[in-house]
């Protein structure tokens, strides 16, 4: 499946916000896990990413852990979240 | 006062020449090779330099680490405070790394070192505080400790309130035993008024560009001498 424009935008946001050194958008597989495995992000990154989503797209995540886990599973689920809930 | 022994040291600053001294790294950007990239990205240049030096001085990650810095990461802390006054939300990663023990903390996560660590700020008396703390651990039967002193310029808006300083970090492994290749670190009382000690002064002293370093706050001075006659 090809990467959409929104997915590419999110890749760049992740790299910039989380100050990922030596990572390019091509290195992020949209179907690979973002956290722990795959890209290897940690819990502080999750908070940071939540903040970035709020700033850029006006999305406020509910504090309930299970739904956040699903939204943050990989780049495609993150793109789906932004697509459906973005305010700006 | 009992003599201490300097077993080895490392330093980083782009503001000096190496003069053939391999223990001094003068590159603009330290490699940060000691820390995996996913942790390294959260460290500033000083943090990267300090972690590299700790790996060199304590490859088995088993040393007690004392880290002193007068101002810590002032840039990061003040940026967050200015952000708060504008009503901006805090960055969790930046907040986590703005604390005074951030560098030692990242080092302990990366290296697996679970020994005691201390983060010290002493309003200009950092070097004297490091030596005093080191004496405490050594008196408690630890064979050696690693002391680290690092600082960077204070943010421009506050520069008028602190002595001018430039980015430098220095790490020393200090013990009580007079190993043949160690140097004796002796401490004396001094009464002369001298400027506040900064990491760069310690580097100059280690490279024999000055004979004594002195702390005006504690009125103590330190000299290095060869152990071998």
Image: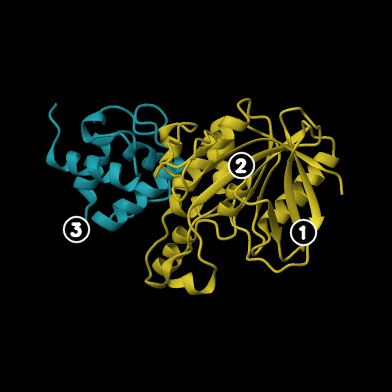
Chain colours: A cyan, B yellow
Q: Nearer the viewer, mark 2 or mark 3?
A: 2
What mark, if any, has residue B220 been given in the picture? 1
Name the subunit of mark 1: B
Circles 1 and 2 on the same subunit: yes
Q: Measuring 31% from the left and 55% from the top, which residue is drawn there?
A: A54
> Could you tell whether B172 is left or right of B151 in the image?
right
> Could you tell whether B100 is left or right of B130 in the image?
left
Instruction: For marks 3 and 1, give the CA distance.
Output: 61 Å
> Could you tell whether B142 is left or right of A27 in the image?
right
Q: Nearer the viewer, residue B49 or A19?
A: B49
- Return the disc, 1 or 2, that comes first in the chain's sequence: 2
- Image quarter in which the C terminus of chain B is found: top right
Q: Measuring 64% from the left and 63% from the top, which residue is drawn there?
A: B124
Q: Nearer the viewer, residue B64 or A27?
A: B64
Give the residue pinned by disc 3.
A88
Q: Position of residue B38 (x, y in %)?
A: 42, 35
Give the residue pinned by disc 2.
B171
């Amino acid at each position: 499946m090809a990467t959409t424009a929104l997915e590419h935008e999110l890749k760049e946001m992740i790299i910039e916000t989380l100050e990922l050194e030596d990572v390019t958008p091509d290195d992020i597989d949209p179907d690979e896990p973002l956290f722990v495995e795959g890209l290897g992000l940690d819990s502080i990154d999750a908070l940071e990413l939540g903040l970035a989503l709020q700033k850029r797209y006006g999305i406020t995540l509910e504090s309930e852990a299970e739904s956040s886990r699903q939204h943050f599973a990989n780049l495609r689920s993150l793109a789906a979240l932004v697509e459906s809930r973005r305010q700006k | 006062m009992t003599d201490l022994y300097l077993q080895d040291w490392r330093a980083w600053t782009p503001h000096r020449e190496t003069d053939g001294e391999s223990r001094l790294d003068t590159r603009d950007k330290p490699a940060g090779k000691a820390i995996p990239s996913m942790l390294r990205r959260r460290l500033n240049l000083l943090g990267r330099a300090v972690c590299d030096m700790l790996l060199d001085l304590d490859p088995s990650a088993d040393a007690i680490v004392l880290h002193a810095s007068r101002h810590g990461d002032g840039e990061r802390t003040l940026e967050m405070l200015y952000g708060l006054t504008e009503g901006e939300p805090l960055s969790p990663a930046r907040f986590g790394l703005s604390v005074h023990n951030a560098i030692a903390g990242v080092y302990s996560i990366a290296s697996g070192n679970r020994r005691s660590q201390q983060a010290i700020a002493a309003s200009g008396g950092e070097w004297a505080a490091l030596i005093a703390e080191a004496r405490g651990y050594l008196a408690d039967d630890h064979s050696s400790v690693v002391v680290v002193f690092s600082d960077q310029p204070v943010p421009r808006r506050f520069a008028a309130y602190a002595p001018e300083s430039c980015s430098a970090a220095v790490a020393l492994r200090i013990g009580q035993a007079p190993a043949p290749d160690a140097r004796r670190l002796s401490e004396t009382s001094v009464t002369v008024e001298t400027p506040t000690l900064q990491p760069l002064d310690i580097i100059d002293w280690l490279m024999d560009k000055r004979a004594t370093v002195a702390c005006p706050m504690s009125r103590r001075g330190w000299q290095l001498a060869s152990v071998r006659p």
